[in-house]
Image (cartoon, rainbow, N blue to C red):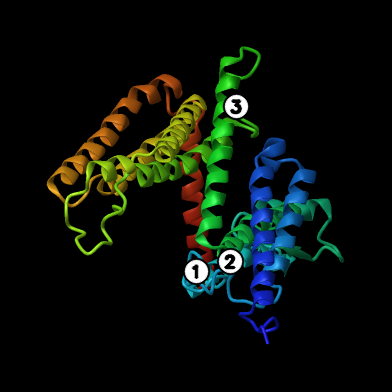
Amino acid sequence: MSGALTPHGPSGIHHATAQDAALFYGLALLLVYAPLFLGTWRPVPLMIMELAAVALLAGLFMPRQAAAAGSEDGRTGPVGHPGRPSRPALLFLLLLFLLPLFQLVPLPFELWSELPGRAFYAEALRLAGDTEDGFNWRAISLIPTTTEAAWLTLLPPLAMFLAVLRLDRERLLVLVLVFLGIATGEALLGLIQYGNTLMTDSATGTYRNRNHLAGLLEMALPVGLALLAATVGHGRPPHAGRPHGRRKPTLRQWIARFGVARINQTAALGASSIAILLGLIFTRSRAGISLAMLGILLSSLMFSYRLGGRNTYGLIGTFTAAGVGLASLIGLVPIWNRFAYADPFEDGALVQFGSSLSLCFCSIFITWAVEL
């Protein structure tokens, strides 16, 4: 008996590998499709993306005949149990998924009119005569259709988060590289748009506005810097696993660490990080450039030890990497002043944010007081 029907037999492993491959290619297509059509802002592209997310979620709940594609050689996914998020993460995802649905719960008009911010709309509905029979129950949300649409847009990120837990580290790294390639392409497209006099005065990529592109690039920049630090940083020497692992490496072994493939990877990741940073600058987004500066600072502090080491020379390398990161941060300050708008209150964004935040706290306090 070859064990073809057993969970860990060749058939079971092949079935699990096929499932993981389908999830992998589905996630890759979802990553590539997401920035298209103004960032899937239009209804039809967004609906296609939501249907693809439903298909991914359906594939996640299909029975698996093997624990993982690489279970026999000891490989696991990004977590200890592939496909099983931790209980706090699962609780957070459940609350995130149910919160918009809670806004669709219908309430009697008398109770609905007592909610914070509903007095004006309740009075308008009374004057319009919409409080008669058939209109006495209303959803908590002021615009239920918009709330339902916002709930459906949670499906793609939810499916993405749950699906990556089923993949091994190799495929997950490929998806990260795909994401980094998409961000690099968007940054290069934004640079082309900025240099074209027929386009707008800021980079937007394939997104609706510059802030959406800045949101993508500011997330991709720390990822590119992390991969760059992992490539440049010292790895495990080839002679470390030998009986005399503490002996000094030979010249040949030292040169082998800087092979052509390693140099190509370093050059590609460095060019990608620079392109993402330039694209982020030319978006002229104040928040985007500020978060880029914060990302460079945190990346320098987190990955400086990776670039250095435990010995004396490594300690010097650590401080050097941190110093270069801080110097880059200081150098971005005049760029922020040059490309971002001179007056932070020019469009009243900060004022609107402060007012909205104050209203949120007031609404929470009023709701809490009413419940008491």
Q: Which residue lies at the image location 45% right of the left edge and 45% below the top edge?
A: 223
Q: Is residue 209 left or right of residue 145?
A: left
- Asked if the residue under mark 1 is in contact with the one under mark 3, i.e. CB atoms within 8 Å, the reply is no
- SS at circle 3: helix
Going from N to C along the chain, the mark reached first, 2 or 1, is: 1
Q: Position of residue 51 (x, y in %)?
A: 76, 56
Q: Quadrant of residue 93?
A: bottom right
Residue position marked by numbered label 2 in the rendering: 166
Three-letter amino acid code at disc 3?
Answer: Leu
For marks 2 and 3, give the one nearer the viewer. Answer: 2
- Residue most extreme to the right: 133
Q: Residue at x 27, y 55 (%)?
A: 239
Q: Which residue is the site of mark 3?
A: 189
Q: Position of residue 302 (x, y in %)?
A: 30, 49
Q: Quadrant of the N terminus?
A: bottom right
Give the SS element for disc 1: loop
Dot label at residue 76? 1
Please state the horizontal and vertical placement of residue 135, each as a whole percent of the image: 83, 63
Residue ranking furthest to the top:
197
Q: Compared to 349, does 58 lie above or below?
A: below
How far apart in space, not on screen, are marks 2 and 1 (Cα)?
Answer: 9 Å
